[in-house]
């Protein structure tokens, strides 16, 4: 409902970009952030064990409902390493291993006027040769390893790897734990734009 209100405000007053991260998100989609509860979860990916929720395994299938419910908070993870060199500008190269398309849609949404990642000095690039970070999405398979390494090796130093979505982090439902090293994992199936933007900002600090 709030998203529709944002659209109407944009029509009536012109483009209105959100103030996030200076202000809290206007709206976090219910089943895209934190989850809490107690009891049987019936979880197909073991994202909930002993009443504890693991964001990096959760595909938001809602089998755990009503014992577990959304908290409304962003699913945040801390970067394993920060890159202060990217404070002024940060160019990201999306690399799709074979997703369902959902992570792609949410990542590309950052370029919409509502989020406008360019105002924060973050930009998409069409080649790894101009990229500071490679954003990997989808189930990582052995046959895609060579393609990934070619793209990674083409990137200039310093460079970093970001895993976007559960499939890229833990393999999701159909994959296995991927054989790659990422600086930050952005959980979600798919992650919402706020969580992605928050992670991109954290990597640059």
Image (spheres, rainbow, N blue to C red):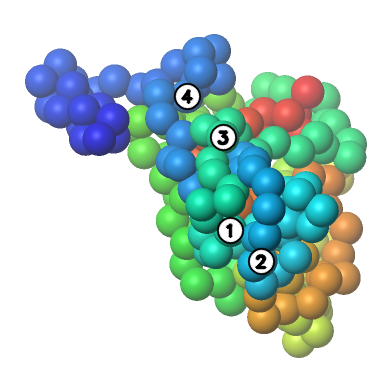
> Residue tagged by mark 2?
43
Residue mark closest to the camera, 4 vs 2: 2
Kindly identify the residue that appears in the image at 47 percent across and 62 percent down: 102
Frontmost residue, 20 versus 75: 75
* C-alpha span from label 2 to label 3: 18 Å
Residue extending farthest front: 39
Answer with mark 1 or mark 2, whichever residue precedes in sequence: 2
Label 2 sits on a secondary structure element that is loop
User: How far is disc 1 from disc 2 in space, using C-alphas?
Assistant: 6 Å
- Residue at 64% x, 67% y: name it: 42
Picture coordinates of residue 30, whole percent (x, y): 46, 42
Foreground of the two, 24 or 129: 24
- Report which residue position mark 3 lands on: 71
To which residue does mark 4 refer?
Answer: 25
The residue beneath circle 1 is 64
Residue 27, given in percent of the width and then of the height, sits at 41, 30
Please identify, in this view, whether the residue under mark 1 or under mark 4 is nearer the observer. 1
Q: Nearer the viewer, mark 1 or mark 3?
A: 1
The answer to whether residue 100 is visible is: yes
Structural distance between the alpha carbons of marks 4 and 2: 28 Å
Residue density around tag 4, few if under 14, some if 14–19, many if 20 or more, within 10 Å: some
């Amino acid at each position: 409902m709030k998203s529709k209100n944002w659209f109407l405000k944009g029509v009536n007053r012109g483009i209105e970009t959100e103030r996030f991260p200076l202000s809290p998100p206007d709206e976090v989609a219910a089943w895209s952030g934190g989850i809490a509860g107690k009891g049987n979860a019936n979880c197909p990916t073991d994202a909930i064990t002993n009443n504890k929720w693991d964001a990096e395994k959760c595909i938001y299938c809602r089998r755990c409902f009503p014992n577990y419910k959304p908290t409304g908070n962003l699913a945040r993870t801390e970067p394993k390493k920060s890159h202060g060199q990217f404070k002024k500008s940060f160019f990201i190269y999306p690399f799709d291993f074979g997703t369902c398309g959902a992570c792609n849609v949410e990542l590309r949404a950052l370029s919409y006027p509502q989020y406008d990642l360019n105002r924060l000095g973050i930009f998409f690039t069409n080649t790894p040769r101009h990229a500071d970070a490679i954003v990997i999405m989808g189930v990582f398979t052995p046959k895609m390893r060579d393609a990934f390494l070619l793209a990674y090796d083409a990137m200039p130093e310093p460079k970093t790897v970001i895993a976007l979505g559960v499939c890229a982090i833990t393999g999701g439902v159909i994959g296995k734990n991927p054989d790659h090293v990422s600086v930050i994992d952005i959980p979600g199936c798919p992650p919402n734009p706020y969580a992605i933007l928050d992670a991109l900002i954290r990597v640059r600090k």
